[in-house]
Amino acid sequence: MIELTGPLPHPHQRRHEWRPGDRLTHLDGRPVEDVLDVYYYQPEDAVMRLSIRRSGGEEVAVELPPTALDALTATFAPMEFKRCACSCVFCFIDQNPRGMRDSIYVKDEDYRFSFLYGNYITLTSLGTKGLRRVIEQRMTPLFVSVHVTDTAQRSRMLGIKRQYDVCEVLRSLKDNGIELHTQIVLCPGWNDGAYLERSFRDLFALRRPAEGEGGVASLAVVPVGLTAHREGLTRLDPVTPAIAGRVIDQVAPWQSAAAAAWGGPFLHLSDEFYLLADRVFPPADHYAGFPQEDNGVGLTRRLEEVWLDSLRWAREARRAPKRPLTVLTSELGALAFRRVHAPALEAAGAPPLDVIGVRNEFYGHTVTVAGLMTGGDLRRALLDLPARPRRTVCLSPRVFNSDGVTLDGLALADVAAGQPHEVHVPDEEGFVDFWADLE
């Protein structure tokens, strides 16, 4: 059932007198659990017949035209996450300090959010019913946290007692046309070395056909993230520059063999490996359309292409950037700017960029990505800048969530308050266009 949180917008509201507690139970006689059911079962170009149950148990029948679908779904209460039952040794949620917003501590394991938003799931909570629904409703693609394909080792890493063969479930999804993007969070001593090789080979055996649907379309390997708040948790070692270099060298022949056999790139390392090891990034076509960009895979290379293209257009339109900028970002982001972006942009005629990497005091110095920076750390870095000359400072949009606040609950105005510089959060892809538009 789906809770209805308000009346339908005009002119559809006259068809149903909404009351608090109303819940949509059926669409055309079929029970509905969430908005995905509604979209899947909606009749094409026909009247929608809704069954609504009031808080007192009274059943109400309502008919709406198909054009009212968006108005109907706008009244739905947000879907709630299905919670994760794993206790992964590397779980980042367990490494959050106390006193943050409640939502920060939510562990989700929901195939619906994997389909809708690209959230990674372990599949351990999918069950027969969920598997059947994914296949029936064609929820593709899904994003799956595999970590290691050896069943016993995976159970240890995920902190579960059940011996769960993830490849068996992936095979069922593949055989039914579901595309899969997979990831491995690399934990030295746990799933590297021979475990990593077996995982690659098992997942490549489940690859999507060159011509067809279903199967593993990509595998991303990302380094484990470790904060300074691991009291009482399993001891884990970080991915050091030396380990990052060894992993790059280990997977290089697998990448070549997979690309030759499959006709395109399959196995990807996140940008952090190349930045840690001070290695050259693969070319853009290595990332095959960047399907795992939100996982930190290929973002540096793609932004380089986008920004250089934008700069070329700006110069042709005689509106090239003229003002120097200060970029305040994470330590890893600063590495990407210094090694890739700033040299490429300046070689193409852009003004100099002053890039400042901000140390993460909130989570600890081993956390270096922009998405885990806090407003407090950024604010301290802003206040540490000399007051003169007045700067134009850019922050990464990855620091702020969809509500415009940082992990520690600060808005941009809070971060920038009481300091003399002009602070902006340009759109990531539109960075050069923003720069060019500055007076």
Image (spheres, rainbow, N blue to C red):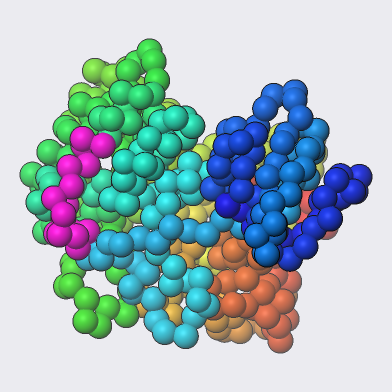
Relative to 116, 235 lies left or right? left
Relative to 183, 254 lies left or right? left
Q: What is the quadrant of the C terminus in the image?
A: bottom right
Query: Residue 302 in the image: x percent, y percent?
Result: 51, 39
Residue range corresponding to the magenta coloring: 154-169
Depth order, front residue of 316/265: 265
**Which picture quadrant has residue 167?**
top left
Residue at (49, 55) in percent of width and height: 337
Residue at (52, 59) in percent of width and height: 80
In this picture, is 154 found above or below 318? below
**Which picture quadrant has residue 168?**
top left
Camera sees residue 126: yes
In this picture, is 376 found above or below 24? below
Q: How many labels does the image show?
A: 0
Camera sees residue 277: no
Depth order, front residue of 304/11: 11
Query: Residue 430 in the image: x percent, y percent?
Result: 67, 47
Depth order, front residue of 329/216: 216
In this picture, is 23 found above or below 208? below
